[in-house]
Amino acid sequence: MKAFTAKHQIIALSVFYAPIIILGIVFNCLKDLLLVSLFAHIVWHYYYLKKLNNWLWFDKSTILPKGKLDWQHAFNGLHNMQQRHRKRRNDLAGIIRRFSEGSEALSDGVIVYAKSGGIVWSNRLAQFQLGFKRTDNSGFSRKEVSGEHITSLVPDPEFLAFLKRDDSSELLELPSPIHADKLLEFSVMPYAKHKRLLIVRDVTSYREMDEMRRRFVANVSHELRTPLTVLQGYIEILDMQLVDSPQQSKTLTILDQQTKRMCALVEQIMILSKIEGAGSVDLNTVVNVPFLLKQIENEAIELGKNKSLTIKFEIDPNLHLLGDEMQLRSVMANLIYNAINYTPEHGSVKVRWRLSCKTGGHFSVVDDGEGIAEEHLHRLTERFYRVEGSRSRDTGGSGLGLSIVKHTLSHYGCELKVQSTIGVGSQFSFIIPTRYLIEK
């Protein structure tokens, strides 16, 4: 049906009032006829206006009342608008239904909440994980209606601080508030206008498998130490009883080298397992980093003598750290010894430990060795990864050193940065946040 335009309105008024005007002129009563006609027109409009009002406010039926002429066009327009709204509502309901079905299929719990804290929407998995319910199938929660805050879902100060920080790059692990044996991982991110999306993931099985792996590796490494110690002892005995035989001497040398390499590998695996199993940095222990680096410097100079390396240490004598001395020694020694091992004869290695005014304690090791190709840089901290097969074997490397560095630095909330150019050299560095520094 066509829309009722101003042109149609003028035609309708002309059809109604033209005969009245003609009759008024003919019978000389134009004024009286116009007044009566106008009054009748108003009453007629009021009658249909009342029918529309009753339908809007009192009639529960969705069927529009019937009208005539202008009002039939008006009712038809309302009917068309009603149909459009119904179609739009059905379309939106379909979108919401598909979104809800998709969210229910997710392996993570999802909660949408207002920036003020009121829960807006959630999937069933989130309700199961955190122990709250919603009123209907749309996902709207009773807690939003009653005005409860999202922080009431997990009664833990860490969770409250986590939400206040509103950092999308941060992850938080806490026990489930309703299942003490479950471990949940939380992440939060911006969502729509003035809203946030809370992702809840059950990481219990992952952590259990990780713990089993660590225990297995630690147990195997521990069991390997005894036979390796016995093997070293027998190699030493054979070496003392060695007759003048070049072939036997060569064989014993190879056995001794490989046994020592195996012992070093086992030791590094045990260190890595211990670091991975550590929960966080011990903030009650102050590590004398300058003294620690002085010890490593003496060892490094001895290690570099065979290749006539120039080794220089620049250490801030007043800059100490909170943490585990064994872990810090492992990090710094690994980086320094790597630089020495991979720097050619007559090369140089420079070590720095200083305070960076803006960021924290800056540690760096710079060498002028052969360098590392760019495609290898992002994989250097993977377990047992080697840039070249012969490179690590020639230097006795196990491929675990930088992995130990990575996991230790993660306890300090920082990461290892590597810059390298083929034929120029490499720089390995990291920055310890200010909160872990002690100046004396």
Image (spheres, grey):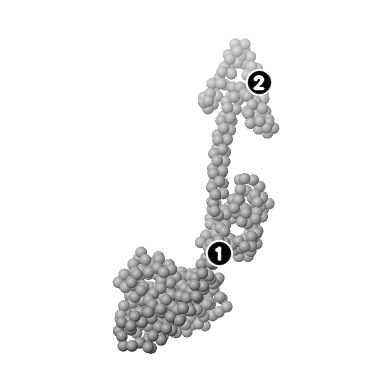
- Residue found farthest to the right: 58
Q: What residue would you read off at disc 1?
A: 208
Q: Amino acid at mark 2?
A: Ala
Residue 179 in the image: state x and y as whole percent: 64, 60
Answer few, some or many: residues within 10 Å of disc 1's Cα (few below 14, many 20 plus, some between 14 and 19).
few
* Image quadrant assignment for residue 22: top right
- Mark 2 lies on a secondary structure that is helix
Earlier along the polypeptide chain: callout 1 or callout 2? Answer: 2
Q: CA distance from mark 1 to mark 2?
A: 86 Å
For this rendering, which residue is in front, 223 or 120?
A: 223
Q: What residue would you read off at disc 2?
A: 40
For this rendering, which residue is in front, 425 or 355?
A: 425
Q: Say above or below: 305 vs 86.
A: below
Q: Amino acid at mark 1?
A: Glu
Number of on-image labels:
2
Q: Say above or below: 120 vs 295.
A: above
- Residue sitting at x 57%, y 21%: 13
Residue 357 in the image: state x and y as whole percent: 47, 74
